[in-house]
Structure formats: C-alpha cells, structure tokens
Amino acid sequence: MHYRQGRAAMTTGASLCVKCGLCLAECPTYLASSNEANSPRGRIALIRALEAKTIGPSAHLNELLGSCLLCRRCERICPSGVPFGSIMDAGRERLGRYRPLRERLAAALITRPRAMHKAMAAAGLLQRLLPGESLARQVLARRDRDAGPLRRLYPARGSKRGKVGLFTGCSGRLLDAEALQGAVKLLTRAGYDVHVPEAQVCCGALDAHGGNLRRAHALRQKNEAVFGAIEGLDALVSVASGCGAHLAGYPGMGALHKDISEFLLDASVPQRLRFRPLEERVLAHVPCTLENVLRAGDAPLELLGAIPGLEIEELGTRGGCCGAGGLTFLSHPRLSRALRRPLVGQIEQLAPRFVLTSNAGCGLHLQQGADSPEYLHPVTLLARQLMTD
C-alpha cells in the first residue's frame, strides 16, 4: 500500500464493515479481554472516529490498536470482505509518535541487517531490547548456525524446469539461515535455478504494521525493481510466512509470490524426490499468516508427509496466533505469553523431538516458552532427510 493511500484505506475499507460481529469469536484479543474496543469491529470504529476527528490520536488509542496481533483471522471469515489488515496499517500510521521507543528501536534493528549484526555483536544491547535472557540467547544461537552468505545464483541440478527468485528477508539470514539453505537445496534438486539477488531488502511488513507506510512503500519499490530485473521468473518464493503475507500484497509482483512449501508441493517434490525415513513424532505449527493470508496452511503438512515414518500432529488451533504477532511479544508481553501458554502445554505434554513452523518469529516465541524440542522450518527437516545419491 502506498503511504498516501492510507487515508483512502481507512475510509473506503472501513465503510465495508456492517458490524455483524462474526469476527468476535475469531479474534484472540477480544476473546482474551471481552472488550469491544479490542475486537475487529471495535478497532474499525475507533479508526473511523479518528479519521472523522471525533477522537484524536493518543497513547490510549495506540494501546488499543497496537494490541492487535494482525493474525487476520477476522479478515478470512468476513462475509463483507473488509480489508482489516490495510485498515489497521493505515490507522497506526496516524499514531506513529505514540509507539513505544523500545518497539521502534527493535523494528529498526530487525529490518536493518547491518544494525542487527552490530547489536548481536554487542549482546548486552540485544538483551535490553529483547525481553528475557532466553530470547536473546536463542537469537544469538541462531546466528551461530549461519552457514555463510548465499550465492547470487544456484543452478538447477539435473533437468531444468524453471527459474525462481528466493526472498531471504531482512532477518532470514540471521534467524533462519538453515531454512534458506534447505530451500535452495530442495529447489535446485527439483530442477529450478534459484536467484538470490544481493540488493533485495526487507519486505516492509514490520514498517507497515508499525505505521511507517512511507518506508514500507520505499522497500516495496526496491524489491520490485530488484526481482523485476530477473527475466523469466516463474515465482518469487519466500521462506518466512510473515514476509510472504506482505509480499503477496505487492501490486507489481504479488501475483508471482509463492510460499516455499506451496511452491514445492505444486512442483510435485513429494513425487520427484526421495527422503530418508524418520521414525519421530513432530508437532507442526501453522502460522496465522500462512493460514489466514496466504491460504496455504495445508502445504507444509502435505510436504512433510513425504518423509516415511514421520508422525505429524498439529500444534494449536489452525489460523490462531501463537502470540508473537510481529512485535506484539515486545509491546504486549502479557497478552503474548497468555496466547502462547496452551501451545506450550501441548508441547510439554507430547514432548516431540521437533517443533516445525514456517515463521522464525513464531519459533523463537514458542521456544522461549518450551526450550526442549528443536525448532525448525519444515523445509529444513525435508532438506536434512533428502536422499541425494
């Protein structure tokens, strides 16, 4: 969304809401508080009042809008097609100066890889920005698993079937490097050239959701130019579902976007490649962005079924939010922990060897509550089990 379109989104999109209330039973923040102001229709009413100048910007209004997880479960079931995510981004743009400093600093770090590297080198700074010693430790541990920089081009192995661009994200190489390497391995073995342009930047999701639509628009333009310069792309593939949900909304390239699991499934990877058996129980978490926005929640589960002997059970309620919610774990830690609690209980009860999730932020948040299993992206486990001889 262009930053100048924010006001239009508030008026035209919000006017579609007929206040039917079907969203109430789907909204995690309303269910947690029973407060109408914490429901989708309540937040839309507040944004409309803000636009009509019936109410003014305030810290209290920022608290009400900022507690939304943007899981977009309400958007998925809305019979009127209210574009809730766009409305929220536009509403938050009007409240930027009320956003807590710590949250703004964390967003600035995460979306700027060089700054994040420096913060990780100064671990004390990272621990001051991230709540809890365990979360900072997990971030640093994931950095230590980095296999090094990605090349710009990975040629297809065997008979070439096409060409894809791989979106790494601003923090993907720091927080889920093994998933990116796994995606490259599976894509090339499936017959695809994989282009990883060095000039790509953050997708813009955190800026958009934090109300900085101007920067989100600039990042989108940069990425569209970078990937648009690669001739003949069959798809723009992303690994993190949070990034993918935002990339899918790019007006210039959104139609080309595919989540990695969905793309591999469409490419018949379970039939074309062979995987070593693994007699293990795993819990598979389907992030809200993958289910509610990308509508591809079944894809990783079907892909994982290609590993013989793997026992797969879903974690939590499909389409629900684990509580990470972008930077909600920073801005509303109590709410975030409350939403995570039943998932942690399920993990502790089943004691799986692996918890698999398509979003690194969800994995970090869940791991902070239950640290025993290994947390992986589904493509990481698939790549580990891939038979290459």
Image (cartoon, rainbow, N blue to C red):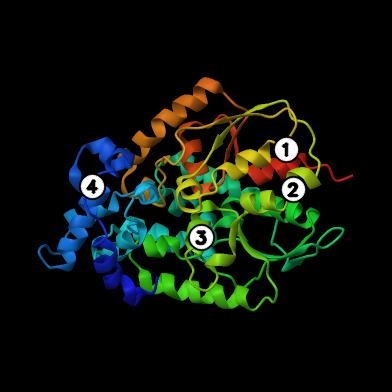
Q: What amino acid is found at the position of numbered circle 4 in the picture?
A: Cys
x, y percent for residue 362: 49, 44
Q: Earlier in the sequence, mark 2 or mark 4?
A: 4
Q: What amino acid is found at the position of numbered circle 2 in the picture?
A: Val
Q: Nearer the viewer, mark 1 or mark 4?
A: 4
| Residue at numbered disc 3 | 116
276 left or right of 218? Answer: right
Quick one: 206 or 302, which is closer to the camera? 302
Mark 3 and mark 1: span between their CA atoms? 36 Å
| Residue at numbered disc 4 | 20
Q: Residues within 10 Å of mark 2 (few under 14, many from 20)?
A: some
16 shown above or below 25? below
Residues marked 2 and 1 touching at CB (< 8 Å):
yes
Mark 2 and mark 1: span between their CA atoms? 9 Å
Residue found 44% across the figure and 48% down from its top = 127
Q: Earlier in the sequence, mark 2 or mark 1?
A: 2
Q: Dot 2: what SS? A: helix
Q: Earlier in the sequence, mark 1 or mark 4?
A: 4
Q: Nearer the viewer, mark 3 or mark 2?
A: 2
x, y percent for residue 150: 70, 62
| Residue at numbered disc 1 | 306
Q: Earlier in the sequence, mark 3 or mark 1?
A: 3
